Image: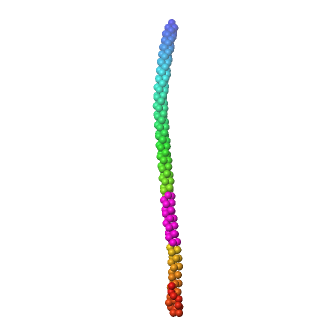
Amino acid sequence: REDSTSAAERFATAKSDAEHRESTIASLRAEVSKLQSRLADARDHSDNEMSERLRALDSAWRAKTSSLENDHVAALENHRMEVLKLQSQAERERQALVQQHEETERKHTAELAAVTDRVTQTVSRKDAYIRQLQEEVRTLEHALQTREAEMARHTALLQDPNSSQCLE
């Protein structure tokens, strides 16, 4: 009997130990399940938080990029307008210089024509005066030659006592 009592006790103890182990295993499994659920919740929460942060960062990045693009476009437009303004100003100044050059050329041409006309008139007057003087010189030379010839004839008559011609 003792063997059977001891076997029954051992069986009861083993059964109790097995039940206790199963209870512990079930408890551990429940704890693991709870931990896995908490871990999944924590991961979901972390993923959601990361997604929110990424969305916020992406939104901020897009806003900053858009702002930079708008600033760049505005700066380019300002530069383009400044270039157009400078080109327009340069064209106006070029046209003013061309007009000034043309006006200077016209004045120069007019002054040159006036000077040329005065020089031509002066040269013509001088040429006419020179021709007049040359004519007067020829007339005076002719008169001088005639007078010298007359003087020579008179001198010859005065020196010749035989000459009976009278001096006229």
Q: Find residue 2 and report its horizontal and vertical position in percent.
A: 50, 8
Nearer to me, 25 or 119? 119
- Image colouring: rainbow
Query: Does residue 16 lie above or below 87 as drawn?
Result: above
Q: Find residue 106 and report its horizontal and vertical position in percent.
A: 50, 55
Nearer to me, 28 or 89? 89
Nearer to me, 67 or 74? 74
Query: Does residue 142 lie above or below 66 as drawn?
Result: below
Q: Residue furthest bottom?
A: 162
Q: Could you tell me what secondary structure mostly forms the magenta stretch?
A: helix
Do we see residue 10 in this rendering? Answer: no
- Tell me which residue sits at (46%, 34%) in the image: 67
Do we see residue 29 in this rendering? Answer: yes
The image shows a total of numbered marks equal to 0
Q: Find residue 48 and report its horizontal and vertical position in percent.
A: 48, 24
- Tell me which residue sits at (53%, 89%) in the image: 165
Residue 144 painted magenta: no
Residue 130 painted magenta: yes
Q: Residue furthest top?
A: 1
Nearer to me, 8 or 1? 8
Residue interval drawn in magenta? 109-132
Q: Find residue 13 and report its horizontal and vertical position in percent.
A: 49, 12
Query: Does residue 152 lie above or below 139 as drawn?
Result: below
- Tell me which residue sits at (52%, 72%) in the image: 131
